[in-house]
Image (tube, rainbow, N blue to C red):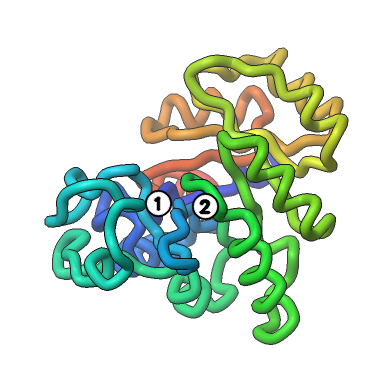
Amino acid sequence: MKKLLCFAHRGASGHEPENTLSAIEKAIDLGADWIEVDVYAVERELIVIHDERLDRTTNGTGFVMGNTLEYLRSLDAGKGQRIPTLREVFDYVDRRAGINVELKGSETAGLVVSLINEYVATWGWRNDQVIVSSFHRRELGRAKKLDPHVRIGIVIGGFHRPYKKFVTQFTTYSVHPRIDLVNADFVRSAHERGLKVFVYTVNRSEDIARMAAMGVDGIFTDFPELVTKRQDL
């Protein structure tokens, strides 16, 4: 049986505040293979947070992109954690797991590629330890044009947009479909194109077993132990 890769969704967000260093540490403790985080660019700094607005995950208000970096860094993101930068995430993970960076905001591709190149050149990371993913195909295309070695993954959400044209245009590593869009035909078709299939967000043991039976390559989950313990059996 092939290994089912575990992507800790925003860290171990079922246990700790999402997209924080404590969630990342918990995910690593639970044996996650990969850490998934979301980024926006504010004042040319990559800020790790999922929502466009601050209200759900922090004690702040308003839009991420409408606030200063100083204000964002002053907020409580849960249990006293602050919103980290992507650089802090890379330093904290320190190659103990791979990192999947999801581009949420505009003008993120160039900054992310630059940071990846720095960590590959200077800090011992490898390109295969990082995936850049997004719903925003224009940003993914920019990332690939900036550095052909960057691994990119297309996130497929509520509307099942065809991805074949993008894959033909840009060498793509993976597709990340929402769980309710996945069936055996989808997995087979993606694999025939040489793509890995990483499914989100899978938080029930029975769904993990179902995805594994279809042959997916990995899942995003808020509870990494559901995957890592399964593979110890």
Identity, as a three-letter code, of the amino acid under mark 1: Arg
Observer-nearest of 212 and 28 = 28
64 up-or-down from 191: above or below: below
Name the residue carrying label 2: 232
Name the residue carrying label 1: 10
Which residue sits furthest bottom?
122
Residue 77 falls in which quadrant of the image?
Answer: bottom left
Identity, as a three-letter code, of the amino acid under mark 2: Asp
Task: Categorize mark 2 by other alpha carbons within 10 Å: few (<14), some (14-19), many (20+).
Answer: few
What residue is rendered at 44% in x and 34% in y?
201
Secondary structure found at label 2: helix
158 up-or-down from 106: above or below: above
Q: Is residue 153 left or right of residue 31?
A: right
What residue is rendered at 45% in x and 26% in y?
207
Observer-nearest of 141 and 177 = 141
Residue 114 falls in which quadrant of the image?
Answer: bottom right
147 up-or-down from 166: above or below: below
What residue is rendered at 52% in x and 52% in y?
232
- Residue 233 visible, this angle: no
What residue is rendered at 84% in x and 55% in y?
148
Pinpoint residue 193: horizontal percent, then vertical percent. Answer: 85, 29
